[in-house]
Image: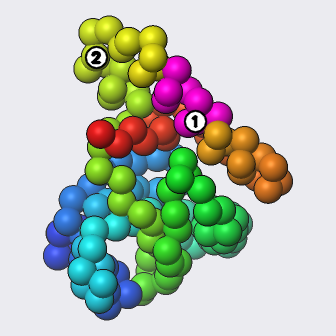
Amino acid sequence: MEKDTDLILGGRYQIIEQLGSGGMANVFRARDLNLQRDVAIKILREDFIEDLSFQARFLQEARSVANLIHPNIVTVYDFGHDEHRYFSVMEYVDGTDLKSLIRESKNIQIPKTLDIMIQICEGVGYAHRDGLVHCDLKPQNILVSP
């Protein structure tokens, strides 16, 4: 079996490192070899590959988010299927997740806390006005850039 870092998806996206994992997918930082930029790639977990309902849900999630253009929502660039992997390609956000930020910070100042909360509300509100509801909104799923 090949190591994740040897993997090139769709003949284009070279996996660099794993960033996280969730109930449905694993997320990696990758290099788009065509455009020479880092991206985040969400790969449907292997135990869901054969499940048509998970495939459809994964594709629908990518399609729904791909139509949202907002500074507080990660941009979806691409969706693909490579051998036995389904993946979506997204904007790579250099930073940390809100859960890690909270753990690592002894005291987050009120102005910074309010700024983060306002940005979360702006992104979520934009999605809601477009008819989308984030079903897994939690600190681990909120990215905070420097």
Q: Residues within 10 Å of mark 2 (few under 14, many from 20)?
A: few
Which residue occupies 64% across, 40% down?
122
Residue found farthest to the front: 111
Residue 19 % position (x, y): 30, 51
Amino acid type of the residue tagged 1 in the rendering: Ile
Extreme residue in the top direction: 107
Q: Is residue 110 magenta?
A: no
Q: In this picture, is 121 found above or below 66?
A: above
Numbered mark located on residue 105 in the image: 2
Q: How is the image coloured?
A: rainbow
Magenta residues span: 114-121
Q: What residue is rendered at 42% in x and 85% in y?
A: 82
Q: Say which residue label 1 marks.
A: 120
As shown in the figure, which amino acid type bears the numbered disc 2?
Ser
Q: Secondary structure at mark 2?
A: loop
| Disc nearer the start of the sequence (1/2) | 2
Q: Quadrant of residue 70?
A: bottom right
